[in-house]
Amino acid sequence: MTTSSPGMVHVKTTINGQAHELLVPPYMSLLDTLRELIGLTGTKEGCLDGNCGACTVSVDGRIVDSCLVLGAEVDGKDVDTVEGMASADGLHPLQQAFLEEAALQCGICTPGFLVAAKGLLDNEPSPSEGRIRHWLAGNLCRCTGYDKIIRAVQKASS
Amino acid sequence: MVATFEPKTDYKVIGTRPIRHDGYDKVTGRAIYGGDLTLPGLIWGVCVRSPHAHANIKSIDTSAAEAMDGVLAVITGADMPEALDKLVDLGEGNVNFKWASNKLMADDKVVYRGHPVAAVAAVDRYTAEEAARKVVVEYEVLKAVTNVTDALAPDAPIVLPDLVGDDLGEDVTNTNMAEHVRHEFGDVEGAMASAAHTIEREYNMQMVHQGYIEPHNATAVWDEEDRIKIWTSTQGAFAARTQIAGILQVDVSKVKVTPLEIGGGFGGKIPVYFEPIAAILSRKSRRPVKMVMERVAIFETTGPTPGGRMIIKLGADSNGKLTAATADIWFEAGANPGSVIGPAAMCVYSPYEIPNTRIDGWDVVVNKPKTAAYRAPGSPQVAFAMESAVEELCEEAGWDSMQFRIDNVSREGTRRGDGVLFSKIGMEEVLEAAKNSDHWNAPLGDPSPGRKRGRGMASGYWFNIGLKSSVNLAVNSDGTVTLVEGSPDIGGTRVAMAMHVAEVLGIGAHDVRPSVVDTELVGYTDVTGGSRTTYATGYACWIAANQLVDELKKRVGILWDINEEDIDFSDGIFNSKAESEKTIGFKELAGKLADLGGPATSTGSVDLESAGDGFGLHIVDIDIDTETGKTDVVRFTAIQDVGTAIHPSYVEGQLQGGAVQGIGWALNEEYYMEEDGSMANSSFLDYRMPTSLDLPPIDTILVEVPNPLHPYGVRGVGETPICPPIPAIANAIANAIGTRLYNTPMNAGSIMEALS
Amino acid sequence: MHPFAYVAPGTVDEAVAVLDKHGDRARPLAGGTDLLVKARANAWELDAVVDIKNIPELMTLTVGNDGLTIGAGVPCYQVYENEEVASDYPCIVDGTAIIGGIQIQSRAGLGGNLCNAAPSADGICPLIVHSAVAHIAGPGGSRDVAVEDFCTGPSQTVLKNGELLVSISMPRPPANFGAAYTRFIPRNEMDIAVAGVGVSVILDSSGQNFVSARIALASVGPTPILASAAGNSLAGKPVNDDTIAAAAALASDASTPITDMRGTIAQRKQLINVLTGRMINQAVERARG
């Protein structure tokens, strides 16, 4: 184990169900790994310090701020991003609901909200409004005032 | 002569809620925002920024950065062209190129913390950031001023030694006062002296930021012909082009700006910050250069809205009619001149008819970032002052404040504070809707033990601009229409443009395919801002669509061998006036165009005055924990005259989003300045914008008083909604705890102080 | 940000060796929610981060008759989603459920929260009132430090060169024990505490009298504060508004806040008074079951 110069880290991970084998700079965030190394730019940069949720992805089924995870840390883990939400059969119900309820204006926070909301509905199919608002408190939106986002999540929940 | 239009009610597409055309790309992550762009050979640029708010630059040593592996270019202010001292109209405000250039990259002095003094381009972002840290700058630190009072004190440090202030037309030197303007009508002193009731109050507000989630970004290529290509998240590619060309001292035609998708602007992405720097780094390195701004720098160096000081005095007769009003307004411009005292003057009295008025406004330079437009810039500030004063006047005189607003309402012909007379406006209708609303008539309800509940309401106004837009249309053989426009889509305007075209042509909204394009593909278009886009670009769409109909009538004439004047068009069907059963639908005609004269295209260009005045009123119920001062918003209703809601969901969205920005501004947001001129809370952790857990649903009531100056009655809607929430909450707090706050943010600490 | 190496050892000894070699230029990486923010802000220059999440002792949570032991890297969500912890240690849940939002709680843990040593930490006061102990491994061997002694100043701890926090443990609460933590923030989530108070009480079998109490304060001094005089003032006293108010006033006296962008001295002192009263009441309620 050498630490004399920051050597690249060999990472084997699954992203949206697809296996990837990468050499990642040790100091590179998971956010930059996704955006710069793999080219998945759906996950967005907002603040780089864990306060806005625009970079939300799911790692082994838990939502995280990918700006505060190192790419090196997802070796052996499953990562899910917004790009993996739709399937060959169509959009995820959350994506469809966001469109129908006009739950996006500029859209920059939307991928983060979609992944975060999916993290909730995957485990709690019928959350209350209060529970939705609490779960999504780590995702900032400056355009919508959240009203239509909450309605969209309620619509997508069973 | 300006065309006027009668309101319609039998729309086919207007008023429906189709899924926005860019929606699928945005919910799947495919949409390309500025930070997502990648180009072959792309390298990354980072600024070196001053840690001091006010300092002379003694020396800059870039050698260590230049020697670093992976660094391809380093520049300083010396690499920036000498910009002209010239004022250019950008639509929502002017820019002086000398100031704009200096703001981007300092010459010999830094005037706000974070002011760039150098920039580095390297193979990747991490290397560029490390290289930037290696640039050594020697400063002589000067005392900083960070509020209007200190800046105007006799011994205040002078931020801009070259500044010549304009005090009601007189030149002033050695000052931080950039401008003093006055608007006066009637006999203010006389009316105030004979008023039965008067009130005079002072209000102080802190600087706040637009808080868009997407950082500023730019990618530049300076090519071998000295042509500059820029990709950026901007509110206006043409406005960006004008600024970039002016700062770089090149012809406008040498600069091509491609607006990528934009993650929020609210006025803050009208000025350019990175584009010229990225361009010069590209010229020096001969590579495409991308820059994305750090969140700290966004707070410290982009364009927040002014804080300031306001003194309002009102006079009313014994019947509850306003007779006189004065406003003294000091706004901080930031480190270069030009704050929004003009718009503030246009807005302060607007919901009211007041025969005798005076407004004095001072624009004050301070060691803070140069302010930019933030959603109805200047109006939320004066709304806080005016609507608080009106409410307090009513409390003292024993008048019902809703009735007071009705009795003093401004209408067509009322003179605005700056002298302009209103045309057809909807403040009366808004008041009526408010008075009859569920919320206004609902009981306040009891708070939990230890809490107090209050209700407040307040009105707000924005004038909404018109300006220039251009669009092109082309018919496809399958009956769809390609729409090319230049208005970046920040909030769902693309779909509203398509709906304009679809309404004229009698086709579906999704049969119109809109694209937002670069400065070489469409005619000049002003910024997406000023609440102008649905109005002005929509109007251009309407013109282009009608021109297309005329063109298509010619083709039908060829088909039927009759004169185009003998052809009618309605609901998507062309018919012969002589033989009314002889018809052809739009789609069928489109399929035949190849043999009827070839491609059918059209254009529309406009240069319009106002987008119609926008009046609104908000009602808010709050709960206050009297032991901690914590305020919770428990119910909120935003009521506004929206003209005609083209796509009601996105109009509702404007009301909701603006209301929540106002709520954050009222309760928590501020630039907390340290003694040394630095902003202590330059992150989303401590610059506290509301989260979903801080809010109830935001109910909306869309009042439609169609604007006669738009074919579908469209009125600007986006900016008005940020104006009422601050005073509505101030009034609710006063209602809850019996004490009024005169400063924002009205946070828990100040409420606790008021309660003690 | 200084480019650092990434090391992921599988044992405590390996981790200690790396940390010892680099001194303060290497830090353990658990959730990363403080470490990466500080590294990016150039608060420190690091040559290496040592990912401790492959070391079993640091990632294990055990709860049972011997009490509760939380590995230094165990994230908050694993603490509050554990049914036994939720039922028997609700005060620990109070703290872990409010550190950041859901995304932060997927990664951040009590170990990192303690080692980050922010006076405003929401995880530390609950540990103090549970009489928790920090278990440290280092080049010189292992040692234990009471959590209330762990932080020595803002961002400063008793950890010496090469030392690594392994786990935090606390005894199983005795009968008639109740504890609660809350903080005051301007919004409803995602904020740093302006003031925070944790209280644990042990009542007598009648539930009408205090046997003992511990009161810990956040955000009102250079470290979290164990307000001994305030806690001790309740020992042997009846549970009523007067004794509680007196303890709350003592807690406020024990606080040494500053005025900064999050609050003023006066505001914080008043908040400590208010929150202490509320938390004593809630702890009593929980103790009475």
Image (cartoon, grey):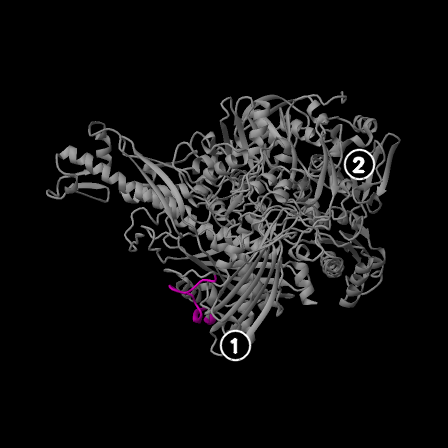
Looking at the magenta stretch, what is its main secondary structure? loop
Side of B115 where A109 appears, left or right = left
Residue B18 appears in the figure = no
Question: On the same chain: label 1 and label 2?
Answer: no
Q: What stretch of residues is rendered in magenta?
A: B403-417
Of C175 and B555, nearer the camera is B555
Name the outermost residue toward the front.
Answer: B170
**Tag 1 and tag 2, C-beta contact below 8 Å:** no
Q: C11 or A144, which lies in front?
A: A144
Label 1 element class: loop
Left or right, B159 with reference to C212: left
Chain letter behind tag 1 = B
Question: Disc 1 residue type?
Answer: Ala
**Which residue lies under the disc numbered 2?**
C165
10 Å crowding of disc 2: few (<14), some (14-19), many (20+)? many
Where residue B338 sits: x, y (%)?
56, 50
In this rendering, position of residue B150 left or right of residue B731: right
Query: Label for residue B195?
Result: 1
* B414 in magenta: yes
User: In the displayed structure, would residue C118 be above or below residue B561?
Assistant: below
Q: CA distance from mark 1 to mark 2?
A: 73 Å
